[in-house]
Amino acid sequence: QSMSDVAAQDMIFIPNDNGVYTCEFTVTDNWGASGSDEVVITVNNVAPVLGIDHMTDEMGAEIGSEVPVTLIGLKTSLSGSFTDVGTADTHTASINWGDGTIDSSMAQFIACTGGVTGQLGDFHIYTVPGQYTIQVSLTDDDGGVDTKTADITVVDAAGALASVIDMLLPSADHPDIQAAIDWLQGEQDSLAANGALDMLDQDDPFAAMQMI
């Protein structure tokens, strides 16, 4: 990075990358005599700053706020943004989805070179229900790293119905809500094996869908 000449007592230099910079100062009097000196400035790298902006299910619902869980077999999408005060830096990203899958090639990646806000995004399809911790890492070309994590709950069809039932239970005093709970978990507080969950347990998803 070159520095512009400054004909003043004070100067400001804002480096766009880490490195060693040499500045030469020259003072000239009105007779043309001059003297010079140099100062060496060492600039250290600063790691990028990363944030996870959204996690959505295949329908576009925000996981954790609009819906509590995501389903196996369907796309789970993640998007994030990042900045770097080293505006000349380049970056690579990776997402560890928590189930043994690590993606280092993003479906979307917009660099933040030049001082803009970078964007990244990718999706994953879980095949096994469970609790997972997603880890997103961003590394600049000088080795600076920022990592963010997010927890996610992945369920199968029965787990999704159980989540809906949990959401309805606080309003079970309303007869229509209680009727919906009965359809999902079975009548008599699930003692009667005639709910949608029971149909799934009996490997009859078509009957379960009819009850939903």
Image (cartoon, rainbow, N blue to C red):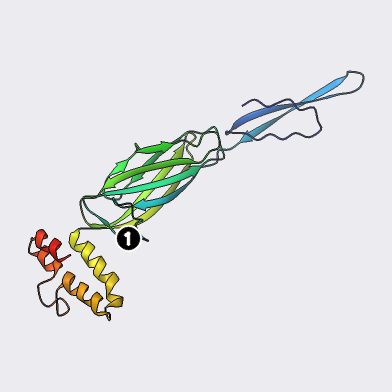
- The percent position of residue 200, horizontal first and vertical second, equals 12, 63
Callout 1 amino acid? Val
Residue 85 in the image: above or below residue 156: above
Spot the residue most to the front: 176
Disc 1 target residue: 67
Residue 170 or residue 11, whichever sits in front: 170
Q: Residue at x 31, y 43 (%)?
A: 102
Occupied quadrant, residue 123? top left
Horizontally, is 175 left or right of 8 in the view? left
Horizontally, is 211 left or right of 103 in the view? left
Quarter of the figure with the C terminus: bottom left
Spot the residue most to the right: 31
Quarter of the figure with the N terminus: top right
- The percent position of residue 63, horizontal first and vertical second, equals 34, 57
Residue 7 or residue 65, whichever sits in front: 65
Residue 134 in the image: above or below residue 110: below
